[in-house]
């Protein structure tokens, strides 16, 4: 008899580089459950995606991912448009672990491994951006060369979005850009500081902060944050905290199956100071596409 197949995809560089402590436990648990297990270790960018493609081709039943959001994103990108898609089990080892938080996956690795014993299967959408995929958030906008100071404690407590809001106090007009949103045959042009497009309700490490968002609701949720003052940034943070970002007067909100976003200038850095995406961007949603194991509430 051919036994059921499982694959463990490990990024040894994720978070605090503690993956080696948990590989054996995961492998043993899967073997006890009757799986034949292959362990794949990533060495560089795209390895996790490549292994995930292989898992689809070999019709592996379950893929356990040990890593942070970057690794999970690569794995989900690898399986996104395959006809056969394995069930995904996540052992969060990153620093932020947005996706795990959004799906209520335990953040302690040992507890995340134990999810295998008594899982609930959750189905989630996945976002498509041009020809790649995203599981949480696409953000456009940053305050260039921010000089503001936030303690690392504040940053880890509030997340990088709060850090961004703090920076608003230093903001100058040059930090805005023109965003054109094409949505349900309408074209809207706005002056924006930040555009957030999300599939899940967890952003910048802040868990369940967007009441209108569910990972399986079949929609992209776009928040265009217009020009804001220091005063606005405080009230906006409070709205975010209470799950009401979309209701803030300086926020334009769109719920869409697909949306086109263009900016002027063409390339806008993102919150974390990365280069960001060159625009125009074409975003869409693949509905109820990925099966992820989580815990019972
Ligand atoms: N062996 C490796 N050594 C160094 N970098 C690696 C290795 N394998 C993969 N990578 C890189 O690690 C990146 C993903 O890291 P990941 O997001 O999982 O961890 P993290 O940054 O600590 O977590 P988080 O995103 O939650 O903060 C991938 O984009 C990939 O390029």
Image (cartoon, rainbow, N blue to C red):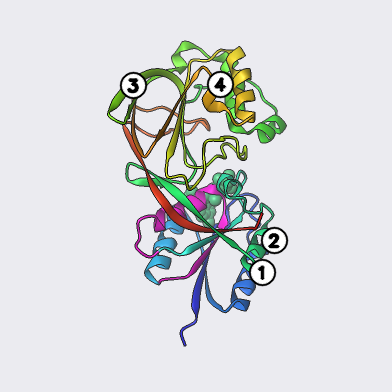
Q: Indicate the secondary structure of the residue bearing disc 1.
A: helix
Is residue 118 at least partly visible in the picture?
yes
The residue drawn where x is 49% and y is 77% is 4
Q: Give the mark, 2 or 4, whose residue is nearer the N terminus.
A: 2
Q: Marks 1/4: CA distance?
A: 43 Å
Ligand 1 within 8 Å of disc 3? The answer is: no
The residue under label 1 is 25
The residue under label 2 is 110
Q: Marks 2/1: CA distance?
A: 8 Å
The residue under label 3 is 188
Q: CB of mark 3 within 8 Å of CB of mark 2?
A: no
Mark linked to residue 146: 4
Q: Give the mark, 4 or 3, whose residue is nearer the N terminus.
A: 4
Q: Residues within 10 Å of mark 1 (few under 14, many from 20)?
A: some
Q: Marks 4/3: CA distance?
A: 29 Å
> Compared to 230, does 69 lie above or below?
below
Q: Give the mark, 2 or 1, whose residue is nearer the N terminus.
A: 1
Q: Residues within 10 Å of mark 3 (few under 14, many from 20)?
A: few
Q: Marks 3/2: CA distance?
A: 48 Å
Q: Indicate the secondary structure of the residue bearing disc 3.
A: strand
Which portion, as a residue range, is magenta?
59-84
* Residue 270 falls left or right of residue 165: left
Q: CB of mark 1 within 8 Å of CB of mark 4?
A: no
Residue reaching furthest left? 185
In which image quadrant can residue 47 be found? bottom left
Q: Marks 2/4: CA distance?
A: 38 Å
């Amino acid at each position: 008899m051919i036994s059921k197949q499982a694959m463990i995809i490990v990024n040894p560089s994720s978070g605090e580089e503690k993956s080696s402590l948990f590989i054996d436990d995961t492998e043993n648990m899967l073997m006890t459950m009757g799986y034949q297990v292959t362990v794949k270790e990533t060495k560089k960018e795209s390895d996790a995606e490549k292994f995930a493609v292989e898992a689809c081709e070999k019709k592996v039943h379950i893929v356990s991912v040990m890593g942070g959001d970057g690794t999970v994103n690569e794995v989900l990108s690898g399986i996104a448009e395959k006809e056969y898609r394995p069930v995904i089990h996540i052992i969060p080892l990153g620093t932020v672990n947005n996706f795990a938080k959004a799906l209520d996956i335990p953040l302690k690795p040992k507890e995340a491994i134990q999810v295998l014993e008594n899982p609930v299967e959750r189905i989630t959408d996945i976002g498509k951006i041009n020809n790649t995929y995203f599981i949480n958030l696409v953000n456009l906008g940053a305050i260039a060369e921010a000089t503001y100071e936030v303690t690392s404690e504040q940053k880890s407590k509030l997340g990088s979005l709060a850090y961004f809001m703090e920076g608003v106090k230093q903001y100058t007009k040059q930090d805005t850009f023109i965003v054109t949103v094409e949505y349900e045959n309408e074209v809207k042009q706005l002056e924006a500081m930040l555009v957030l497009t999300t599939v899940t309700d967890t952003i910048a490490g802040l868990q369940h902060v967007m009441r209108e968002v569910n990972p399986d609701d079949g929609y992209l949720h776009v928040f265009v944050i217009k020009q804001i003052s220091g005063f606005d940034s405080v009230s906006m943070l409070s709205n975010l905290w209470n799950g009401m970002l979309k209701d803030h007067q300086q926020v334009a909100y769109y719920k869409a199956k697909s949306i086109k976003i263009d900016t002027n200038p063409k390339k806008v850095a993102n919150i974390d100071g990365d280069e960001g995406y060159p625009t125009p961007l074409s975003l869409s949603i693949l509905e109820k596409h990925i099966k992820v194991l989580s815990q019972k509430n």
